[in-house]
Amino acid sequence: MGVGAGEIQRGEDAGVVAERVEEVGVVVQRGEETGVVAERVEEVGVVVQRGEETGVVAERVEEVHVVVQRGEETGVVAKRVEEVGVGVVVQRGEETGVVAEKVEEVGVVIQRGEETGVVAERVEEFGVVVQRGEEAGVVVERVEDVGEMEDQDNGDDAELMDSVGDSQRLLSDNRMEDLENEDNHESINDEVEEEASIGTDSDEDEDMPDFHQDENMNDKYYPLQIIIVSMRKGIRGLKGAVLMEAIQKENRPSAIHTRLIMNAAGRWLIRKDKYPSPKEFAKMAESITNFFPNTGNSKIFYDPVTKTGTLERYVRQKRSREKKKIIKNNSNSPLTGIKTFSPREVKEAEIYMRTNTVNRANKQKMLHCLTVTRKIRRDFVKDKKTTADMILNKYPMLITLHEAVLEEFEAITGKPLYRLVQTWDKIEDSIIEEAESKFGKTASSTSARELIASAKQAKEDFR
DNA sequence: GAATTAGTCACGAACAGCCA
DNA sequence: TGGCTGTTCGTGACTAATTC
């Protein structure tokens, strides 16, 4: 590229437009012309080529779209990478070119001062591109996060971030000033306290960046910045960067803030099939205290000697609870033994059952009607307001028709009722044996003797 | 509309069970 | 036996429903 920083080209001429970086406008080429399209960095748009023309397609970073080329035209076709169809056109200085043919290869187009470049080669690496002075950086690692950024007020998180590199520098002083100058005078701490009271939503986990595979245990620290920003994004406006900022301001982080940081780190550590190793816990604990020196000793989060700490405890219990949750959800899944019928069939069956009593001639038809109405009956039964009386009044054949009960049980549990009886029989025997061995057949306690005797009697009566 | 109540959820701490 | 992992219990915060 022949034009230096701060210089623009108009036709054949070139000139200096600014002495300082802050004053540099964005140089674009429109057909044969080159001009400045924005005076301030904040106004920097994305430069694309439309046919023979080059233009700015977005005024603000938040509006950065994916630029693609369709035939002879270039345009913005999607807000999100998932929607991208063809290749991506980027402008590098005076040049424009397609950098990818397939969606998988789509890179992110950013403007660095007067340069435009691709910052990620793979979709997995796609991040939200922000402009900071003449630099740009990726602040979110995953595609899904791009859409979220659009919903946020102004991409503050992005601006707070510098780069993803080795440096874990904290927030910029400029950003701090910006915040203080904002119309909203509500303190950051208030904001965070409010958010903290909301608690942490497990759904957030879905958006956690997953670069465990690429992680290198030789690195001394985890990229805590990214983890926290993406972890606590978009909860009523509280962003991880704001949280980090608040903690940075505190001499000693509040219990709530410390917890939020730990939760974010802990959730990131949780993997679906693997419990984090002691090394990983230790590394994360070190990362936290390195990033937030005011949190104190890393042993609070994880002590490699005792192999415990708040971080470890959090991860362990979170894993356990989430497993439980999955099991609970699965148990609520539709029962395979219950078939679905059309509303008309169900209605007809309900009317038939209501207007007829069970007899030898219509027994099979009644059983069929029970099958047809089983799904709505389950919903009816599951309703907390439904009493046993209501069920039996509505479906009296559950009392009079023995097969109805057996079929109902098998359809719901997937197992025949006799299996339950057999299993319970064995359990009952074991309980009586255990009681007799513990208290002796001539138990000294009257109540123990009576209990065993009544259990035996009940067993006999049931047979 | 405010106050109260009940249900739910997430958490930390402690304890329990399994396994090498 | 000790480490690892899961479970239980008590607590606090939140929300929806109910009562006044």
Image (spheres, coloured by chain):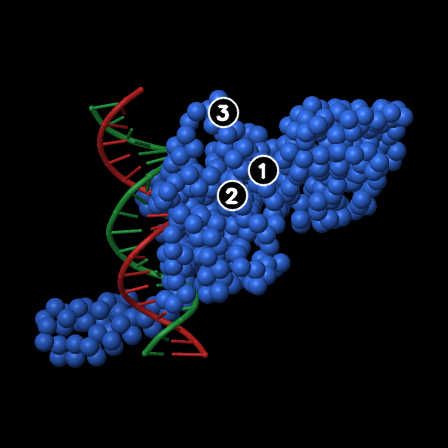
Chain colours: A blue, B red, C green
Q: As shown in the figure, which amino acid type bears the numbered disc 2?
A: Leu
Q: Which numbered disc, 3 or 1, marks the residue that appears first in the sequence? A: 1
Few, some or many residues within 10 Å of mark 2 (<14, 14–19, 20+): some
Horizontal and vertical percent for residue A446? 9, 71
Label annotation for residue A158: 1
Q: Are marks 1 and 2 in contact (CB under 8 Å)?
A: no
Please state if A169 lies on the left or on the right of A110 as rendered. left
Residue at 61% from the left image edge and 33% from the top image edge? A150
What chain does mark 2 sit on? Answer: A
- Determine whether the residue tagged by mark 2 lies in a helix, strand or loop: loop
Which quarter shows the C terminus of chain A? bottom left
Q: Which numbered disc, 1 or 2, marks the residue that appears first in the sequence? A: 1
Label annotation for residue A181: 3
Horizontal and vertical percent for residue A369? 50, 47
Label annotation for residue A170: 2
Q: As shown in the figure, which amino acid type bears the numbered disc 3?
A: Asn
Q: Nearer the viewer, mark 1 or mark 2?
A: 2
Horizontal and vertical percent for residue A435? 21, 74
Q: Is residue A116 above or below residue A209?
A: above
Q: Residue furthest front?
A: A19
Q: Residues at marks 2 and 3, common chain?
A: yes
Q: Is residue A218 above or below residue A145?
A: below
Residue at 21% from the left image edge and 79% from the top image edge? A437
Residue at 67% from the left image edge and 48% from the top image edge? A125
